[in-house]
Image (cartoon, rainbow, N blue to C red):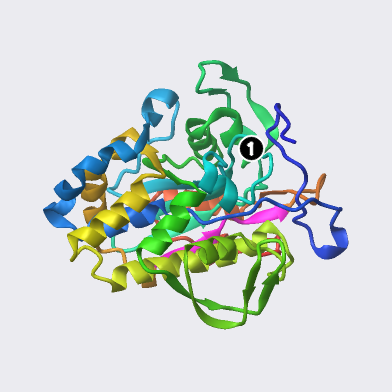
Amino acid sequence: MTDQTSGTESRTPLAPPSRRAPRKRRRGLKITLSIVLVLLLAAGGTVYWLYSKLDGNIKGVDINKALGDDRPEKLPTSGQNLLVLGSDSRAGAENKELGGGGSVSGARSDTAMVVHIPEGRTRAVAVSIPRDTLVTRPECTKPDGSTLPSAKRAMFNGVYSLAGPACVVKTVEKMSGVRIDHYLEINFAGFKDLVDAIGGVTVDVPQDINDKSSGLNLTAGPHKLNGTESLAYVRTRHGIGDGSDLGRIGLQQQFLLALLSEVKSQDLLSSPTNSYKIANSATKSLTTDSGLASLKSLAEFGRSMDGVDPSTMETIMLPVAYDKQDPNRVVAAQPQAGDLWKAIRKDGTIPESAKKSPATGG
């Protein structure tokens, strides 16, 4: 049950096994792949016109209008920051089936990454924000026009369900001081269909996984996963790390790099038929900020990122510590988190000390 004041849900242990309280089965963590669409279109040149009929698939959110001027300053360089979100919406039969069915209402930000592309756009860093991070949620205007008051110690993934994507962007900007230039969101069905459209993704499974909750059974070593298997892989937590959400972030980030490598290794845009299939799979479950809510805009932005190589992309989990009042939750660890966000704000090098998290579940 979600607390309508703080946005918290039923408790999900993040503490080491000896400190855990009883818990219900989590509804899963999945990686967001909206950024992959951008990279798929990066090499397309002028071929985006082939997909102009797909523009209607993309849902746009006017983040700038919703947030107004009370925002951090833009980078003084040409660097860019994207908030990439995965929602666990059960809307539609396919999303409900992939999400495990049940009577879950609404949607939450099941996965969140701040992707920073420094000036020059030849590399990138993705910062994962654990969904159970306690944050100060700012006052937000809800989609229906009503006001959601500010709240301390609100769980990060509950912000989406209470006030929508613009409030998630505002929350990230307030906690980091980082100006978010673009927003991309995809749901369960979009994740599965996109992986299937590119022919699956090969991952090197770090250890045997036998997860009764997700139905995933894999031996250690390389496996080529289809869309359904990939969704289970990035949602699994049993048998990985300490069994918490922090442990799953490692699989999430590993899968992102494997997927981007697969995209880069294929000439996916050589066939108009294949290109249309991929674009359709990606766009039909995609929500972006209004600045990217067209194939033309996505293609132009994607081409500007053509120099980003997955082998140089760095993945970091926001440094967090177990909350002293509630070991089932985490809070941003200082000074590590502050140093991380400062480096991103200045488009600078992230210090090694800012990449280490006191919470060791991951």
Q: Find disc 1 in the rendering and name its residue.
A: 158
Examine the image and state in which quarter residue 260 appears.
Answer: bottom left
Q: How many marks?
A: 1
On-image quarter of the N terminus: top right
Q: Position of residue 60 (x, y in %)?
A: 36, 34
Examine the image and state in which quarter residue 185 appears.
Answer: top left
Task: Kindly report the secondary structure that dominates the magenta region of the rendered protein.
Answer: strand
Q: Secondary structure at mark 1?
A: helix
Q: Is 316 colored magenta in this rendering?
A: yes
The residue shown at (27%, 48%) is 78
Q: Residue furthest left?
A: 46
Location of residue 61 with respect to 141 vertically, above or below:
below
> Residue type at mark 1?
Gly
For residue 82, side relative to residue 43 (left or right): right
The residue range painted magenta reads: 313-321
The residue shown at (68%, 70%) is 240
Location of residue 136 with respect to 220 vertically, above or below:
above
